[in-house]
Image: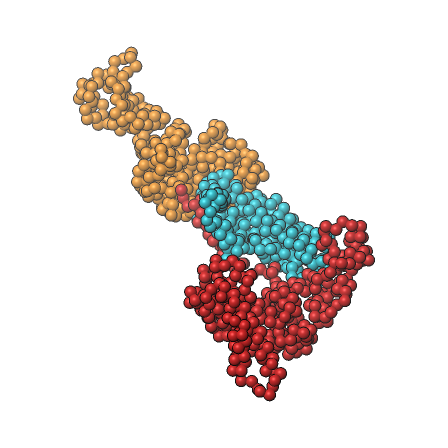
Amino acid sequence: MSRPLGLALVYVVAMATPVDAQDVTAQRERVAALAARWAVLRDSLAAMDRDVRPDTVIAGRLHLLVDPAMQEHLAPAALIAWSHLEAALGKTDSELLDAWWPAVRYRGMDRWAWSRAGPGILADSARSAEALARVIEDAAWSWLLVLGGNTVVRWTSGLHPRPGRDYLRRAYLELVDRPSQATRFCYQGDLQWCAKALGLVEVADRWRELTTPADRRILLRRRRWERSDVFQQCQAGADAACLRLTDGYPLARPLSSDATTGLVIEARSLGGDGALSRLLSDSTLPLADRLEATARAPLDSLLSAWHTSVMAARPYPSRLAGATAWVTLFVTGVLATFALRSSRWRLD
Amino acid sequence: MMFRQVLYTQWKWSAWAVVTTAVAAFTLPLVSVQRAGANTEATDVLYLLGDVAGVGYMYPFLAVAAGITIALLTWAPDHAGRHVYALSLPVPRWYYALLRYGAGTLLLVPTMLALWIGALVATSSATIPQGLDAYPTAIAFRFALATLFGFSMFFALAAGTVRTAIIALGVAPTAIIVTNQIIISFGGPNLVWTALEYLIRLPGPMELLFEPWMLINV
Amino acid sequence: MSNAIETRDLVYRAGTTFEITDLALNVPTGSIYGFLGPNGSGKTTTIRLLLGLLRPVRGRIQVVGRQVPREAHLMLARTGYVPERPHLYPTLTIDEAMRFHAAFYPTWDTKWADELLVTFRLDRSRRVGKMSKGETGKFMMLLALAQRPELLILDEPTDGLDPVVRREVLMALIEYVAERQATVFISSHLVHELERFCNWVGVLDNGRLVAELPMHAFKNGIKRLRVHHPPSTPGDTPFVLLSREAGDGLSAGEVWVVRGWQATMSQYFDGIGAQLREVVDLDLEEGFVEMLRTFRHPVEVHS
């Protein structure tokens, strides 16, 4: 497809959309958005042109450009994926997917297809519809995060803010096992420290502000390759030596992307319809503001809700599961019965 | 009356084992906590958990060892007499085996209780970092079940004939070796390992033994 | 008269070489039944079948009115058993072993057990595994008797014991039987020992019952006859001719061993033109040997 033809298409689409003629700014923004969508579509189509003759599978707001031969195979997968996405995103946020027309490529057709094309899907015709649906969903979530720019992706390490208890459970473990006063105070419910531990508040010197001398000694102990005198002094309890060792050795945020993703999930849960759209709408705002917009609540309220959820998600891995106990008792009973009915007790 | 006498004879045969395993069971949680406390600072939770987990494998080992020892000592004198005396007693065979089973189970109780008491003492005297909890009762209950499982398994094996025991104990290792050789030579799915996985994961009977044993944990 | 032990068509196989075949035992209640047989004839196996320790291939076993092995535990409550080899727990003391044993027998007589301890000069605190062979034999008999059984099954109870101990054990047994009118089933290869007090005898050879009859019939019925001028073919005899051998060389004639002999049967020899010179009673051991020899070689008639 040539560039003039493409621009013409954008224009037609823009004019065909019923917008308020007096709201020029809004109209410009709409055209810009459509142009962005067109760029994605153009890249996908170009990639598809190189690989296959595409056709389209449509399920809700999902538009998949696929090989016609595989259309029948992918259609049920797309339906499943859409039903999950719609349920997870809600009405407003699912509209974000309108801009996404991924090209679906197949293994074995062209090994470089993945690297040449834009955000798309690598599928496998041998997989079940459910498995393909999961691939489509994952790609959709990744696409949605990319829409919000790099900040959110970096902050969450690209983890998908889909509901689930695992993020919260892992956040609990981090609050407990990270050698940092930020996590310890956060565990106790101090939300200011939670914000610091989550990286929502700028901290000039993480080593000095987020860790105590004992924490620093423990964190530096993990540099097992270190054999210098300074290291020995640090481990012997000299904090000045520890601080010297921290020079040029940046300290990571105490809470990982599991915790931050859990916070996004919490914000979406509080914010209701359109929460994700609000998170992704303005990539220039600080994260804390974007999260407040997402949750439609002050940051403290959001952090408080998150803290409550994290505490509630506490795992109890050492508790004996009822199923384990019953299975063991059952097996023990079976073994005892074997013993009582042993050939030793029957006559030869 | 019968049970009391059966219990008495078994106690006489296995008193040393009962005392030894009970002492070991009492000591193990203390060692676990002491080791963790000595090696770590209060804020270094990962190290503490690592140390607790490092001693953790000793619990199922001790449980099964106690069970096996008591089971083997239960039957050893009858085996020595080729079971002639046991079989000439005026009780149904299964009832006699049940008396021995009951007595053996009762003799495991001191070891189970020793571990529980040891775990309570160890955890009550330890400083546990925030966010972590001690699980003395959970680990004692798990230990009791593992002991009972080990005892029952070897009680059943020892109650059988030597041939049965050889078949039971020989089949699994032989199957693993043969299957591995076949897979190395010809490829294909390792059915034995799949079967083993079923054994050590729920609803497998050995899941209890292969879960992490943590006296202190989140 | 009812039978304390009764088997019918009893078959048992051990391995490929040994089997007990169609065993039909009848042990009358109140009898002292000597179960004779050479080593390896199947006496111990038969006893284990009677006690329910082994499962027969076929056949019916009834002991003190109970079907074995189905009701073996009920039978065992009324039966005292002394096995061929010691089977008690060696780490227990005599006192502990007695208490253990007593717990399983509601008819256990503690007072008599204590008396027997004194009679047998056994030390309560002595460990079973440390006892001498004689002490072990006495202790096992003590356990069997003190449970006051209706039936005693004794498998070579005096084998390997010195004469003094053997006498003590057998005296205790005889006293109990006299007092209680109990049935005794005693196996032995020491034939002369049984001769003194058994009133019934069964002979087993290679898993088959050779004979089963009252002791008096066994002892009186088997005779050695010195016969002069016997015919080459004796024809129909009123007795069972077990064997026939040439004489000792000094005297003409043959030596016949017969079963079922009665004095009036001497007329038979007049009828066939032979002369009966001598009738010799055989003791149990001689009769036992002759019976086995005949059983193993039924056509062995030497001329």
Q: Position of residue B72 (x, y in %)?
A: 54, 44
Specify the farthest residue to the top.
C250
Q: Colour of chain C?
A: orange
Q: Nearer the viewer, residue A33 or A153?
A: A33
**Residue A42: in sight, yes or no?**
yes
Q: Nearer the viewer, residue C14 or A322?
A: A322
Q: Residue at x 27, y 13 (%)?
A: C251
The red-tinted chain is A
Q: Is residue C135 above or below residue B188?
A: above
Q: Residue at x 57, y 37 (%)?
A: C126
Left or right: residue A292 compared with residue A88: right
Specify the farthest residue to the bottom.
A22
Q: Nearer the viewer, residue A102 or A279?
A: A102
Left or right: residue B7 compared with residue C296: right
Q: Residue at x 54, y 64 (%)?
A: A117
The C terminus of chain B - image quarter: bottom right
Quarter of the view holding residue C291 = top left
Q: Is residue B156 above or below residue C136?
A: below
Q: Residue at x 40, y 42 (%)?
A: A348
Q: Nearer the viewer, residue B153 or A293?
A: A293
Q: Position of residue C188 (x, y in %)?
A: 40, 31
Q: Position of residue C150 (x, y in %)?
A: 41, 43
Q: Colour of chain B?
A: cyan
Q: Is residue A296 above or below residue C164?
A: below
